[in-house]
Amino acid sequence: MDIQDTHKRHLDTNFTEWHKSPLSNPPDNQCVEVSFSSNAVGLRDSRNPDGHVLVFDHGEWEAFLGGAASGSFNLPKTS
């Protein structure tokens, strides 16, 4: 078992309230939902709520949001 797996086992994955972007409207509803626990964030496909959930600790989530805000995940520019 690697360090990340050991770390993830200690996260509270009891996600009870899921939030979807208000920009996700019919007919597509192609969006993700997030849920927060005491020490974790869950991310799932809103069209498949019984499917897999990606789990991040709060530090990982904050790093992702910071990268998104700074443009780190923008598509590469094409010529």
Image: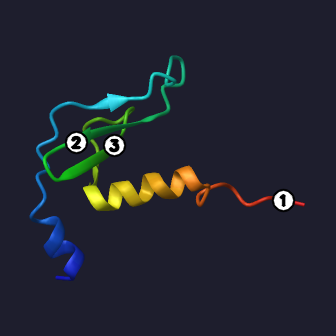
Tag in front: 1 or 3: 1
| Residue 14 position (above or below residue 40) | above
User: Image point 62% across, 55% down: which residue?
Assistant: 71
Report the side of 16 relative to 29 (left or right): left
Marks 3/2: CA–CA distance: 12 Å
For the rendered model, the colour scheme is rainbow
| Residue carrying label 3 | 44
Residue drawn at x 27%, y 47% is 42
Q: Amino acid at mark 1?
A: Thr
Q: Amino acid at mark 3?
A: Arg
User: In front of the other: label 1 or label 2?
Assistant: 2
Which circle's residue, 3 or 2, is located before the other in the chain? 2
Describe the element under mark 1 as helix, strand or loop. loop
Going from the N terminus, do you reach mark 1 or mark 2 first? 2
N-terminal label among 1 and 3: 3
Residues under labels 1 and 3: Cα distance? 30 Å
Residue 53: x, y in percent?
A: 28, 49
| Above or below: residue 48 compared with residue 37 | above
Give the distance between the C-alpha atoms of the residues marked 1 and 2, in whole angstroms: 37 Å
Tell me, yes or no, if residue 57 can be seen here: no
Q: Nearer the viewer, residue 57 or 50?
A: 57
Q: Which residue is mark 1?
A: 78
Residue 27 can be seen, yes or no: yes
Pointer 2 residue: 36
Residue, x 51% and y 17% (percent of image)?
Answer: 26
Residue closest to the eye, 6 or 46: 6
Q: Residue at x 51, y 58 (%)?
A: 67
Q: Secondary structure at mark 3?
A: strand
Q: Is residue 27 left or right of residue 42?
A: right
